[in-house]
Image (cartoon, grey):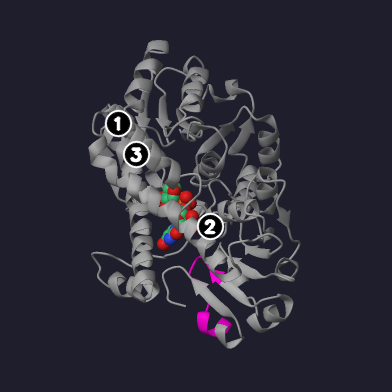
Amino acid sequence: MALKISVIGTGYLGATHAACMSSLGLEVVGVDLDSAKIERLKGGRVPFYEPGLEELLQEQLATGRLTFSDNFDAISDADVHFICVGTPQVKDGLAADMSYVDGAIEAIAMRIKPGSLVVGKSTVPVGSAARLRDRLRTLNPEVDLAWNPEFLREGFAVHDTLHPNRLVVGVASNEAEDILRAVYAKNIAEEVPWVVADLPTSELVKVAANSFLATKISFINAMAEICEAAGGDVTVLAKAIGYDPRIGSRFLQAGIGFGGGCLPKDIRAFMARSQELGADQALEFLREIDSINMRARSRVIDLVRRELGENLAGKKVAVLGAAFKPDSDDVRDSPALDIAVQIHAAGASVEIFDPKAMENAKLRFPTLAFAQSIDECLAQADIVLHLTEWQVFREINPTVAATLVNNPIIIDGRNALDRELWQMAGWKVRALGRAS
Ligand code: UDX
């Protein structure tokens, strides 16, 4: 008999997981407390921008295998329950807020049938899985809990879920592994590496991977600072070191650094947890990774001041990009928006354009000004900041753009524009980590 799974929490991770598991042939019910979100998903609409997901959702709803409900009773006949709720940074510290995960366990514990398996996918502080397993089995002794971290990237969420580069399962029993092997049978048949771990190791894999990625980005941004001081070019340096296969060229794009709903909060929560474990010295370096990352944002503001003078009052600054990265409408901890807000606070008149993230950006910062188009954003600008490397920004014709602005000066915060092309069109191009 085909397995039936439930997905608890239908945000980024859950909505993607539900649609993808259905496309692997499983019967899936997605549940969420947010009725409005559930109604949208039932209607085949994804509440955020993720390439390919809406099409997949509609296709899977049509098969009848995929359903959604705001009533948690809908999960009671499922065999496997995936916890996909968020673990944001707490408001008053660095740690992760576990209230949604704890709430999900309480909500499902008495509803699930004997022999079923609860599988955590959320990113949690190490030790949570063992604690939650105890709690679950106190409430319902005949069920088990495993951990199965998710590594999907926004913008590639469907691809990463259907074709992961590894599947990591943290289990406390052989039965739990067998059930997970049945869930992921198709991926296993495609020879996706299958890593079995104990519960704490599986939780650590996720935060270790994100800490490594954050470190790689901050490393190259530190090199950018040195290049600026020494008159070097970080883009050439990154290319040259990237040819060494031990280093690799990916995640060496210097610029305004990392943001989003994962990397920043995950490294902070990891530091907070290491302190609780009495092992904080081991992660001291992450504090520096975080500082280098935040400094990249201030360095753009310094560059703006260097070009326009200390007093930014009355200057128009055009900001291209609001999302934390291209192909996403996510503005959580977005370096682009953070810079826009700081420049606005310094007295400049800031106008922002982003192809997908304008609505989310407006909700978060209603006092900022948003343009309807790239041209409107550039009009009469004293300086242009390229802060999210969308393809449409790379397609801007710099000759035409030069006729729209007051001053043809652009800061490429992502080192993604064709510098020579812009210079030939009369622009002064500044970038992080490259001599002007
Ligand atoms: C990340 C992890 O990659 C993913 O495995 C995990 O599951 C969730 O967190 P995501 O947040 O979608 O995914 O974004 P990612 O592509 O990792 O980029 C994170 C940030 O780093 C973005 O702001 C991006 O602009 C920035 N970045 C990335 C750089 O500044 N330079 C780079 O070279 C790469």
Q: Is 414 included in the stretch rendered in magenta?
A: yes
Q: Nearer the viewer, mark 3 or mark 1?
A: 1
Q: Is residue 310 visible?
A: yes
Q: Is residue 195 visible?
A: no
Which SS class for mark 1? helix
How far is mark 3 from mark 1, CA to CA?
35 Å
Q: Nearer the viewer, mark 2 or mark 1?
A: 1
Q: Is 51 included in the stretch rendered in magenta?
A: no
Image-quarter location of ligand 1: bottom left
- In this rendering, the answer to whether 80 lies above or below 325 is above
| Relative image position of residue 81 (x, y in whole percent) | 47, 29
Which amino acid, mark 1? Gln
Residue of label 3: 181
Asked if the residue at tag 1 contacts the one at tag 3, i.e. Cβ–Cβ closer than 8 Å, the answer is no
Residue 208 or residue 217, whichever sits in front: 217
How many marks the image carries: the answer is 3
| Relative image position of residue 16 (x, y in whole percent) | 54, 45
Residue of label 2: 325
Q: Residues within 10 Å of mark 1 (few under 14, many from 20)?
A: some
Which amino acid, mark 2? Lys
For image coordinates 33% across by 31% down, the residue present is 273
- In this rendering, the answer to whether 405 lies above or below 207 is below
Residue of label 1: 275
- Does mark 2's beta carbon lie closer than 8 Å to ligand 1? yes
Q: Residues within 10 Å of mark 2 (few under 14, many from 20)?
A: many
Residue 66 or residue 224, whichever sits in front: 224
The span shown in magenta is 411-422
Image quadrant occupied by the N terminus: top left
> Which image quadrant is residue 202 in?
top left
